[in-house]
Image (cartoon, rainbow, N blue to C red):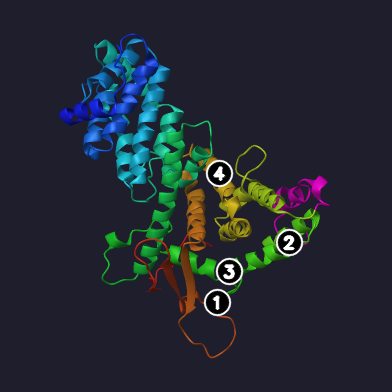
Amino acid sequence: MAQFYNQYESEHFQEQVTDITSGSLEQAQQYIYNFFLAIIKHYQVDDILRQFERLFINYEEIDNVNAYNALGEIIFYSKEHEFKNTLLRCCYILNNNWALNGNISACQKLVDLFLSHSISIPTRIYKLKKLRQWLQNFVQSEEYKTLRSLSGRSGVYKSYHNWSERFSSYLLVSEYTDFNKPPEQRQYAEILARKIKKQFKFDLALYTARIESKSGSSSQRQNPTTLGDGVLILIKKVLNKHGHEDLRGIAKRFRNQVDDMTFAEFKDYLLDYLGISRDDLEIPEIMRLTVVQKFRRFQEHQNDQFMKGSLLHVACNRVLQYLLLNERRQPSEFLQLSLEGNNFLGYVVLLLKVVLICPTSRLYLESYIAELIKFYGNYDEVECRYFISFLDVLNVTLAIFDEDTDYSLVKMKNLENDFPDVNLDNYRVFSQSKRLAGLIAQPIVEQDTTKTLIS
């Protein structure tokens, strides 16, 4: 490997080699970046991880002496901030490439290297002692917390340092929309978020298709949520919401009817569409105060303006914010009330209906959810079990109505009367993934167990 790298470097980096002990920290950083940019195209993942561990964790010689000496220079001049920046950029250079190739497990192995026991072992060697202290500081930093949250651990059965890592697709939003972040980090976050969402949709479709398969083992039917087999009941409830009328169709008709409205008329029409109008006596008082009244007062100076796309966008974003966050950017009162009652399917459908009429608002929905995850992430998983269930319900609901997914509810029993059938046992769910490899289109037979966290 070392022989190959040195040959590759001489062919591709025909730059003037300078004395890297001269104090040029920027040059020292570039040597390290160039090393990992080169080997990622030709080394196997395990070899890259081994090189990374030898350099940054153990401070041992690697296949390029210039990169090794460059790190020594950074340590010698006690530039901890530059070290952390170098370390992070190398992590995102590697993760970005692996995520592009679908190798999420490599991203997870990389971030786990920093949990090595060797980091805490005392040593008298000056540079190694300083490096280990810097690594201990790094592991306690927000940057490392972010790196772990972006490691792609989206499955229930995958190990994670904090339960919030399972919902990293939301946390990634704040990363790739922040232009202050390094470009490698932003690109990696966007790629990984897209892959996690696709994987969740695929796992959900596969699980619902096999839930009662006699030939499928439990290992073949891993549930991507914490809802148990009740996830099937949830899917039926979502598809059965408002009878059998298509929520997509309702949203489309809504969009077609708002063009000739003033902004004031639109706000009332939107609240009616969501089923939380000011005249509805059945909505909770907390909803009336924190969503309905606040939204009707939103940008009142534009009430006489006729609707346009930008107004629709900002209005939908603001409704989502009122539904999820309070003025302190903490969980809204209505969300807290829903979590206390462990009853949030209707609440999630409200969020869905907003996204259906304004798909671009989904980015704002996900960013608001990310703020909530960061808030609840400071608490133990047991304390957040209802919020985690809420996130699972939201994930499932958004997956059902995603553009590249097709779920349908089909009545399997013919009844003698024409009354609407409210017994969900008489229906089967058909799922089909339109774009993912391996189309799934088969009826699902659920187990007798109907225990669920959803009400």
Looking at the image, is mark 4 or mark 1 nearer the viewer?
4
Inter-mark Cα distance, 3 to 4: 26 Å
Inter-mark Cα distance, 1 to 2: 33 Å
Q: Residue at x 46, y 37 (%)?
A: 186
Mark 3: secondary structure: loop
Q: Position of residue 97 (x, y in %)?
A: 34, 40
Mark 4 = which residue? 367
Q: Residue at x 38, y 20 (%)?
A: 83
Q: Which mark is residue 241?
A: 3
Looking at the image, is mark 4 or mark 2 nearer the viewer?
2
Q: Is residue 165 magenta?
A: no
Q: Position of residue 389 (x, y in %)?
A: 48, 53
The answer to whether residue 323 of the structure is visible from this angle is yes
Going by the numbered disc 3, the residue's amino acid type is Lys
Q: Choose the circle earlier in sequence order: 3 or 4.
A: 3
Q: Is residue 294 magenta?
A: yes
